[in-house]
Amino acid sequence: MQLFLKFYFFSIYSTYLKSYSFWLLIGALFSLIIYIISMMSSVTASRNYIRTEYPYYIKHMEYKKLSYEISVLKAIRINKLSNLIYKKKLNKNILDTYINYFDEKSESIKSKNWFPISFFAVFSLPIWNAFINKIIPSIIKQKDWVLTIIFFVALLLFVVLIFALRTILTSILFKKAEKYRQLNELLKIIKESID
C-alpha cells in the first residue's frame, strides 16, 4: 500500500507528465473512494461495538450505510443519566431547576459568541452592497450574457460558501452550548418518565 501511495504522489508531482488535471482528477477520485471506504468501516466498527457492549440497544439501530447510530447513543445517555438521577433521588422540581439552569447557560453562550460575528456582519454588509452595486451595472452595460451567468454562478457559490462557513462557525463556537442543549433535552425526557 505504501509503495502504491509513493508511486501515486510521484506520478502527480513528476515533471514529465503533460496533463496534471487528469492526475489531479484521479487523485481526487482516489481520495473520495478512500474516504467512503473509511467511513463505511468506521460505521461498521461502531455497530459491532454496540452489538458486543450494548446488546440491549440493538433494537434502536437504524442500519443506514453512512450514518452513525445517534438514537442508540441517545438511549444509552438517557439510561445512564436516569440511573444517576435515581441514585441521587432527584425529583421533578430539582430537574426543573437543572433544566432552567442549562437552558440559560446555553442561551448565554450563544448570545456571547454571536456578538463578534454580528458586529463583523454589520460593518461588512454595506461594503458588500457597494461592491455589488458597482459590479452589476457594469455587467448589464456590457450586455455579455456569458459574463452575467458567470457572475450569478459565482454569487451563488459565494452564498453557499457563507452558509457552509456559518455551519462551521456554529459547530466550533457553540459546541458547549450544544452539549448543554442536548443535556437539557435528555433531562426533559427523563422528567417526563418520572412519576
Image (cartoon, rainbow, N blue to C red):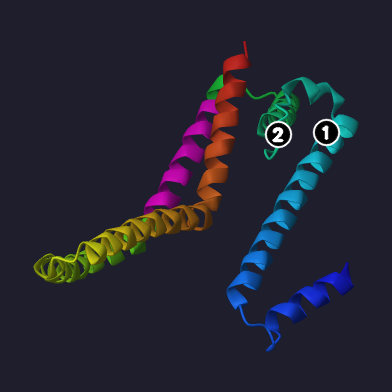
Position of 82 with respect to 164 (left or right) is: right
Residue sitting at x 39%, y 55%: 160
* Residue span colored magenta: 94-112
- Dot 1 or dot 2, earlier in sequence: 1
Judging depth in this view, the residue of 181 and 90 nearest the camera is 181
Q: Main secondary structure of the magenta part?
A: helix
Q: Residue furthest front?
A: 18
**Are the residues flagged by discs 1 and 2 in contact, CB closer than 8 Å?**
yes
**Marking on residue 69:** 2
Q: Which residue is mark 1?
A: 50
Callout 2: few (<14), some (14-19), or many (20+) C-alpha neighbours within 10 Å?
A: some
Residue 170: x and y in percent read 47, 53
Examine the structure image and report whether residue 100 is included in the region drawn in magenta.
yes
Q: Residue furthest bottom?
A: 15
Q: Secondary structure at mark 2?
A: loop
Residue sitting at x 71%, y 85%: 14
Residue 75 versus residue 162 in the image, above or below: above
